[in-house]
Amino acid sequence: MNVVILLEWFLGFLLFWRKNEIPESYDFDKDKKISIIIPARNEEKNIGNLLGSLKDQSIQIDEIIVVDDQSTDRTFSIARTFGVDVIQVEDLPDGWTGKSNACWRGYKHSTGDILIFLDADVTLSKNAIKSLLKVHQKYGGLISIQPWHNAVRVHEKLSATFNIIVMMSMKEFSIIGSKLKPIGAFGPCLVCSRKDYETSGGHEKIKNSVVDDVAIAKSFMKSALPVHNFLGGKLISFRMYPENLKSLVEGWTKNFATGASRSNPLFFLMIFLWINGSISVIFYMYKSPFYLILYVMYAIQFYLLSRRVGNFGLVSAFLFPVHIAFFVFVFFYSLIKTFIFRNVRWKGRKIKTGGIS
């Protein structure tokens, strides 16, 4: 049993071996028009931070479009104060999810050669846009970034396990990730050319997808366009579900079970074994001092991996059983909502998942 748990622990490093942060660029010769599209629904607490950071960029942005997706708060009025282009979504067409519809309408309104889609809770460093353009110039296709998670309140720390497992499931961050195609992209920050977006079918092609980041990556790859994923590091950050525990549960419920069902079976199995090892350590700790050593090893590993994706902290890492228990609860809750009730709730909307059909 000791050897098995030790091997399961080691899987964690193999699955999240590559840090792969977006490199910071200080020079970039801009030769194309840039459009930034921001889908926003009830984002009055976030939209000002993002727009403020965009105004402070070290490169000129030609067009910033905020798509107000039927917000019931001050999102529209706050965005207007920054002098950006704000359009309002009056209705949600049948068969569309809110975010895909907002992104598509933003694209239709835009005129740029390069499209950058940003979630409203993202914040950028001064050279972030320049760095995104430099990376896109090098790789082409679809570039996506998972922002560094600025976890401030206690409940926000509970996202640590989810963030780690998302990285593990992507395949691209594993020890052999440079040789593998990713299973998806990161929705908070997407960069592509207008031409490639249109070739892939854009958000219209994935209009009913609950996990839009997985779906849009697949549509790019089906169109023979490359997809590359990076961590945000010091350049791109966000606060994920800061409102309360309910919003955090709703958010991860929306994303996780459907995403897990589309993951690579081998990687899914390895992630399961890694989680199983952490649970086994907890249950066998009383049997032998060796299991206490394994507990500390899991805690240190949890800290080393979580610091790549956010500021979850050392204390939080040594409380990893709480994180694992919360993850297991939300995962099974998500399975029930996704495959039995066939719907999830997000920002006041009921979203049909379609179950397993």
Image (cartoon, rainbow, N blue to C red):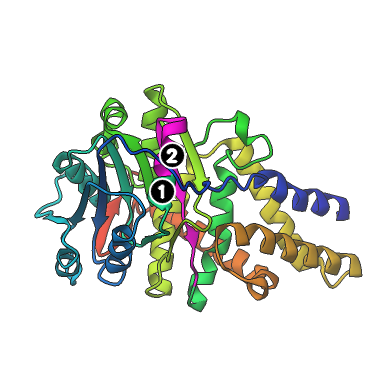
Q: In whole angstroms, how far apart are the C-alphas of marks 2 and 1?
A: 41 Å
Q: Which one is nearer the viewer's eye here, 107 or 340?
A: 107
Q: Which residue is mark 1?
A: 339
Q: Secondary structure at mark 1?
A: helix
Looking at the image, residue 333 sits to the left or right of residue 12; the answer is: left
The amino acid type, in three-letter code, at marker 1 is Phe
Looking at the image, residue 217 sits to the left or right of residue 110; the answer is: right
Q: Residues within 10 Å of mark 2 (few under 14, many from 20)?
A: many
The amino acid type, in three-letter code, at marker 2 is Lys
From this viewpoint, is residue 357 visible? no
Q: Which residue is mark 2?
A: 134
Q: Residues within 10 Å of mark 1 (few under 14, many from 20)?
A: some
Q: Residue at x 30, y 65 (%)?
A: 52
Q: Position of residue 110 (x, y in %)?
A: 17, 42
Query: Within the image, what quadrant is residue 31 found in?
Result: top left
Q: Is residue 225 above or below residue 34?
A: above
Inspect the magenta stretch and tell me whether residue 97 lies in it. Answer: no
Q: Which numbered disc flags the more N-terminal residue, 2 or 1?
A: 2
Number of marks in picture: 2
Q: Is residue 150 above or below residue 20?
A: below
Q: Which one is nearer the viewer's eye here, 56 or 356?
A: 56
Query: Within the image, what quadrant is residue 279 found in?
Result: bottom right
Q: Quadrant of the N terminus?
A: bottom right
Q: Quadrant of the C terminus?
A: top left
Inspect the magenta stretch and tell me whether residue 135 lies in it. Answer: yes
Q: Residue at x 65, y 57 (%)?
A: 305
Report the magenta residues as a range.
Answer: 132-151
